[in-house]
Image (tube, rainbow, N blue to C red):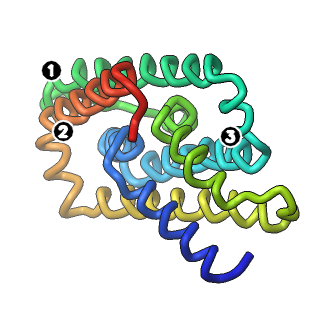
């Protein structure tokens, strides 16, 4: 793969990873609930979900969805339902307030599970890989070039969210976030539900 083409791929992946959304809310919640390690676990397992979609894309997910639009619609609606559920869960935790730390409690298994599910259940991520990454795949592309595409998406996504978890868990930042956790939960809950409604209303652009 030419360097200029790879740089374009890396830039697109970076913009996708840095855009605010449910992935950021996920890492934030688990960092608040369990500290740096839990946030990093959520970030790493989120990366596995990202890698799965990137791998499907280079294997021809774009052609599959183009041929079976009802399947794509079903995946999108299921993703919207899961995002809405996460939003309601965040709002419920927000009502408890920061005076009840148990409302923010998490575990390594929960962080890992939700990391994968948020990636796999995010219809914006599906559209991102199908619409953008598929443009870098050609019929004559060899396995090494396809592997570079998948690894690039995973490394950039994982690196960004691990960095987010490390920064949020800084000794001066995390106490302030925990003090205001109820507001953060309410804001992220509203954003997740709004994203779910946007998906139901029509395709994300």
Q: Residues within 10 Å of mark 2 (few under 14, many from 20)?
A: many
Kindly tell me whether residue 16 is visible in this rendering.
Answer: yes
Which of these two is toward me, 67 or 23? 67
| Pointer 1 residue | 95
Q: Is residue 5 above or below residue 193?
A: below
Q: Earlier in the sequence, mark 3 or mark 1?
A: 3
Secondary structure, mark 1, is helix
**Residue at point 57% right, 67% down?**
9
CB atoms at circles 2 and 3 under 8 Å apart? no
Q: Quadrant of residue 178?
A: top left
| Quadrant placement of the N terminus | bottom right
Q: CA distance from mark 2 to mark 1?
A: 11 Å
The x and y percentages for residue 116 are 57, 37
Q: Which residue is mark 2?
A: 184
Tell me which label, 2 or 3, sits earlier in the chain: 3
Q: Residue at x 62, y 23 (%)?
A: 69
How packed is label 1: few (under 14 Cα within 10 Å), some, or many (20 or more)? Answer: some
Residue 40 left/right relative to 171 = right
**Pair 3/1: label in front:** 3
Marks 1 and 2: in contact by CB < 8 Å? no
Q: Position of residue 64 (x, y in %)?
A: 73, 32
Residue linked to disc 3: 62
How packed mark 3 is, by other alpha carbons closer than 10 Å (few <14, some 14-19, many 20 or more), is many
């Amino acid at each position: 793969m030419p360097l200029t083409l790879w740089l374009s791929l890396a830039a697109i992946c970076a913009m996708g990873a840095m855009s605010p959304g449910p992935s950021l809310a996920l890492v934030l919640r688990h960092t608040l609930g369990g500290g740096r390690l839990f946030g990093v676990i959520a970030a790493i397992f989120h990366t596995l979900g990202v890698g799965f979609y990137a791998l499907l894309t280079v294997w021809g997910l774009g052609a599959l969805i183009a041929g079976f639009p009802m399947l794509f619609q079903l995946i999108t609606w299921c993703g919207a339902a899961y995002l809405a559920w996460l939003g309601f869960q965040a709002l419920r935790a927000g009502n408890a307030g920061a005076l009840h730390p148990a409302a923010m409690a998490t575990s390594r298994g929960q962080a890992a599970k939700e990391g994968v599910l948020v990636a796999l259940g995010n219809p914006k991520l599906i559209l991102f890989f199908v619409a953008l990454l598929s443009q870098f795949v050609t019929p004559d592309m060899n396995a090494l070039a396809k592997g570079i595409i998948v690894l690039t998406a995973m490394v950039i996504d994982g690196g960004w969210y691990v960095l987010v978890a490390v920064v949020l868990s800084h000794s001066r930042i995390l106490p302030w976030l925990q003090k205001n956790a109820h507001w953060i939960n309410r804001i992220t809950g509203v954003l997740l539900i709004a994203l779910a409604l946007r998906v139901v209303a029509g395709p994300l652009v």
